[in-house]
Amino acid sequence: DVQMTQSPPSLSASVGDRVTITCRASQFIMNYLNWYQQKPGKAPKLLIYTTSTLRGGVPSRFSGGESGTDFTLTISSLQPEDFATYYCQQTYTSPPTFGQGTKVEVK
Amino acid sequence: QVQLVQSGTEVKKPGASVKVSCRASGYTFRNYGMSWVRQAPGQGLEWMGWISASNGDTQFAQKFQGRVTMTTDTSTSTAYMELRSLRSDDTAVYYCATGLSASAHFLCLDTWGQGTLVTATS
């Protein structure tokens, strides 16, 4: 199975901060990398798919990118509703695998 | 609107089976598949498997092979996931989820159910 390693596991930030989360794949996954946001007690919500395509309705402060086997989720200016846990997921090979998650907390 | 509505909380004894349902609405059920993802308390997301609603083809994560059954009923637009021989570490929230976007991979999950808590305890 492809291992997805997210970093950091958690981070503290303030409203307005620029936040970047990284996800590294253990092998080549092309651009089949998705990002989800999950709030406590709720189902995950898809934000970005195929590395950088923003899902309809997702604010433009969210963006995705890649550099080799490293993929990034960037929030350009953190808003109060963005405090949540974020997961990456590869869908290049089965089984699709998720990163361990990054919890974005209030500083 | 597109919606997945799951069955309610289950409490089972170790060794028992549990069957969770997921009723879809707002889209043509038979044209898409359904994944099942679980999340143990305080833990991350774990994909369990997928079933095609059109022909019943399945893919399972290896750790669940032989212990999980996924089925669909196109007459009621409902997907089912049955997990047998429950252990305490199967205690988790179980989600059904599907990918409806034509421009994304079918295992990229843009629509989720609300989750079903399954507790395996003696």
Image: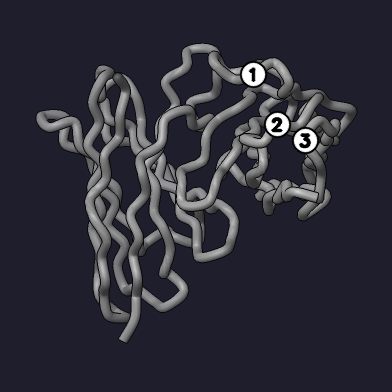
Location of residue B68 in the rendering, given as x and y in whole percent from the top left corner = 34, 58
Q: Is residue A47 left or right of residue A17?
A: left
Q: Chain of mark 3?
A: A
Spatial CA span between label 1 and label 3 = 15 Å
- The residue sitting at 55% across, 30% down in the picture is A46
Q: Amino acid at mark 3?
A: Val
- The residue sitting at 83% across, 35% down in the picture is A20
Q: Chain of mark 1?
A: A
Q: For marks 1 and 3, give the one nearer the viewer.
A: 3
Looking at the picture, do discs 1 and 3 lie on one chain?
yes
* Label annotation for residue A59: 1
Spot the residue most to the bottom. B122
Q: Nearer the viewer, residue B45 or A42?
A: A42
Give the residue pinned by disc 2: A79
CB of mark 2 within 8 Å of CB of mark 3? yes
Of the image marks 2 and 1, the number of the one nearer the N terminus: 1
Give the residue pinned by disc 3: A15
Q: Nearer the viewer, residue B87 or A84?
A: A84
